[in-house]
Amino acid sequence: MTRTIKVSATFLLTIALVAVAGPWLSPHDYVATNFDRLLAAPGLGDMHLFGTDDLGRDLFVRTMLGVRVTLIVAIVASLVSLVIGVAYGAVAGFVGGRVDAVMMRFVDTLYALPFIFFVILLMVAFERNFLLIFVAIGAINWLDMARIVRGQTLSLREREFVEAAKLAGVGTPRIILRHIAPNLIGIVVVYVTLTIPQAILVESFLSFLGLGVQEPQTSLGALVNSGLGQMEGASWMLLIPAALLAAILMAFNFLGDGLRDLFDARQGP
Amino acid sequence: MSLLDVTGLTIRYGNTTVVDGIDLFVDRGESVGLVGESGSGKSQSALAILGLLPRQARVGGRIEFDGRSLLDAGEEALDTIRARRIGMVFQDPMQALNPYLRIGRQLRQVLLAHGLAGAGDADARVLAMLERVGLPDPERQFRAWPHELSGGMRQRVMIASALIAQPDLLIADEPTTALDVTVQAQILDMLEAIRDDTALLLITHDLGIVAGHCEHMIVLDEGRLVDQGPTTSLFSSPGSPHTRRLISAAPRVDRGDPPPPVTSATRLSVGDAVVEYGRLRAVAGASFAVREGETVAVVGESGSGKSSLVRAVLGLVPLASGRVVYAGETLEGPVQRRPQARRRDLQLVFQDPMSALNPQMRVQAIVAEPLLVNEPTMAAAARRERVAGILERVGLDESLLRRFPHELSGGQAQRVAIARALILDPKVLICDEAVAALDGSIRKQVLDLLREVQRDTGLSIVFISHDLAVVRSLSHRVLVMYMGRVVEVADCATLFDQARHPYTRALIDSVPVPDPVVAPKPAPLRGEVSSLLHPPPGCVFHPRCPKAEAICSNRAPTLRDVGGTRVACHLVN
Amino acid sequence: MLRYTLLRILGAIPTLLLVIALAFLMVHAAPGGPFDDERAWSPEIEANFKAKYNLDAPLPQQFVHYIGGLLRGDFGPSLRYVDRSVSELIGNAFPYSLQLGALAMALALVVGVGAGTLAALRQDTLLDRTVMGFAMTGISIPVFVIAPVLILLFAVKLGWLPAGWSGTAGAGRYVLPVITLALPQIAYIARLTRASMIDVLGRDFIRTARAQGLGTATIVRVHALKPAMLPVLSYMGPAIAAILTGSVVVEEVFGIPGLGQFFVRGALNRDYTLVLGIVIFYAALIVALNLVVDILYGVIDPRVRYR
């Protein structure tokens, strides 16, 4: 179980490192076209490690660019669900009563919305805009976290050790800091990890449809889409970004699962 | 040859041995009690007989039933024994019945699985069985969901499902532990009445139940067999020191010398307290007072409002009306709004120490926190000294200071909770079922500790308990509650020797006495506590009262003085 | 039960109104948005459009007008498909999406619940690990990756199945799209089923059933399946949304003339009325299906009805 965590964390860190340093070390840049080498297969020739696309652009650099977008999405997603989700859920859970009922009714309503379609609608109404993707991802991402944190806070609030603290004269700020927050951290870490893959999926889905990141910028979803057109002749254009995307998603899923098992085990029977 | 013959039974999980070579025999028609404290391996042994242990368990030894070995039998062979030859009743009927299936379906399934009835006649047999276990209106209960039944009713259903296939042996694992004492008495009576010649293996921590209902007993301690023999001879001359300790630690409701009344000044008084949760009235006007250095016990079954009452006194739940006066001052509002100086004087010890201790804090931090908040100017060294001092006071070793709660035993954790409550030198300590979760010997130690602290510091104690036998040895005065009302208040000795309210009498008579010489009394009460949402008119106790007359259903009695006792009953003079 | 059902239905109405209002506002209030569009339209569209949308009226009045249209099943005209109304387009396209979605959902439920139950009953064996390994892969591969990979493998390399929709007929053309749509849901449902089945099998009432000698098959069928399905049922809402989302990609990749394809085309062509109409249609569908799931929940769990 801890091995799963180690392996997936190492993989993600390595990928992040390569995505940051790789394009910088490579002799190519992401827009330069090389008409002598259209659709070159992956290999060490000319240092086109992942080959080139139909415009002769270096796919290693472009893929790493896509990975960067994916990782930025991951970071934004976790920040949004951390800040909004945890704050919202904690307030609803701690205050309780009518405030909680209203706040959670709102979350339930948002939950029932087909978000991705709204995002597409937004993309149509406003010009396609990279920032909008983040807004959209944020809007979906904090809901799960808010629900989970709220539930946990609500049950913590009723726990007897909180009552004992109140009886001993401990004030609300200290109760939150010493008694509620430390008991939330485990579950928050787990769910931050588990919401990241969903955020990545949303971004890559939009980019695949051509509604996300726009040319000449790229993302893994966009790369898969352009690979689709060339899959009979140049299957690497499809398979490399597709495999990377799947691997990153899988690593986050494994990490989340591993952390959850660890957390459950710590909670004890 | 014995019906059930277990020899050298061992159960291991990994490297931990939970049952270590025990022998156990049950003859046809016989009733055998399997006794031990928590962790003694009694439930594990029972589960092993029917092959119900989790997969990780490694079971060794020999288990023979009616000449057949059960240990080597496969699941399919065991399925022909289960229910058909050996029935089993579990402790908590809420968890042990399937909440998603109607009662009738759950019982019907047993008959069908063993080919004892066809689809056509199964229902009739189920109805007959429900009637036998004393369920009123079996037709209705047949279609009921488990959550619609009371705890006692559910346990009757559980027993019905264990006996419906007419097994030769019934294994009952703490069958009445989750129930109120008056309901426990009914269930035990019913079980005796309907089991006929079915042998009974009764697993319990309660020596009173064994003394009253088992011919033979077996005592386990930490997975080992320490004693066995006829119940009467084991009680009169226990073979092992462990059994002797168990018997001497078992509190008796029928004898013992309560401490004499105290006459010091009143420290805390509560007048006409009412607690409501929405439409539910949990406490309907209760008054009591505690003197300096006095222990007042508040007793009652579930739904009596005893916990709600003290929680309202502490400001943990709102008081709908009534008032609380402490040291001449009225205490109002929720606990957070009360003055710090008053808050620290009233402390609470909870039933379950594990949930009362923050799992993320070490013992040192848990015990020191009240000091840190109330005496922020105190030097760290002085604080550490106070913590060490209070830990010693409650009989805990200083080496525990660095531990987290999950690294403590139940008894240790409850002492830590008591240390936290005592570190501010409170004047009133409220114990809400504070020893209910503890085993006999540890319970005795904690009670001794409370008595000692009271003697040394003049602490007032409000002791909430459902266990009358514990109350008898500890309290100066006793308050009996039923459905949110105080029905009787008296000095401890007076109450136990001449209980005046029929409910108090019934409560005392329902407690099993750990002495086989004292024959168990028949269950004194019918039925169970009425719904708090729809309390009966007049005296709320009248539907269950054996003496109820016409007036009882018309007019609610009020507390009045009757020869040194305050009692709320029309029929007492 | 009737009261519970009615309450649920009443509860769904505000959600639906909110969805419509939100979608409507997004399109109409966007700065430089569609209805300020200066691009030339053919005169008949423009006239038709102005009349339909009451464009000179204040926004709230336009909204009421739009809702009125919706109540009659009128989503207005398409901006790009001349002479076609949005309702007509949806009416023509939806049957394809419905077939695909329903088949995928059925497949996901049957395979997912089956595999999850099997894995739970054989916990920690090779079978369990294999199923869970597949499931982990399944939830980690996006639909738009599964689709081309399946085409590459089964259509291009092996030539067993058609890669596209048009020009082929018969059941064969359903196979790859349905499998693509179902795979991630199979994975989710298998994981959920396994976890909840393990949880339920560990509860006390299962031990009671074992003590009654009912046998594994009866225990799973009579006692465990219902409660173990509750988390799966709760997941049906998100699953429906995920299948609708996935169908957008699948229809695009396989060239199926379903709702998803029109949606993407509309989005790329800035056909506002069409996109707005489809979003509202999808939302209504999801709200309605969630309602059905809620009511089913009440049927299975007797305790929630009283809440």
Image (cartoon, rainbow, N blue to C red):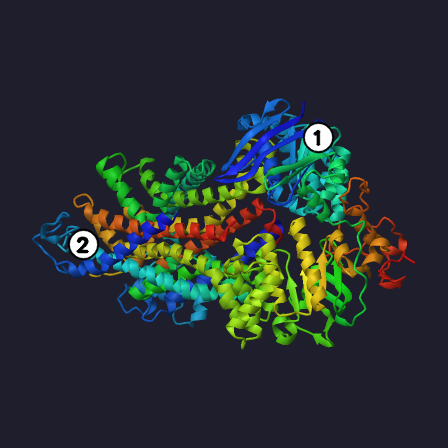
Graded by Cα atoms within 10 Å as few (under 14), some (14 to 19) or many (20 or more), the crowding at tag 2 reads many
> Which residue is label 1 attached to?
B199
| Residue C280 visible in the shown view | no
Question: What is the residue that sits farthest to the right in this orientation?
Answer: B573
Q: Amino acid at mark 2?
A: Phe
Task: Give residue B36's quadrant in the image.
Answer: top right
The disc at residue B177 is: none
Between marks 1 and 2 in the image, the one whose residue lies nearer the viewer: 1
| Distance between the alpha carbons at the discs numbered 1 and 2 | 78 Å
Task: Give residue B321's quadrant in the image.
Answer: bottom right
Provide residue B443's location: percent of width, then percent of height. 67, 53
The disc at residue A60 is: 2
Q: Output the chain of dot 2.
A: A
Graded by Cα atoms within 10 Å as few (under 14), some (14 to 19) or many (20 or more), the crowding at tag 1 reads many
- Left or right of A171 in this view: A117: left
Residue drawn at 35 percent across, 48 percent down: A3
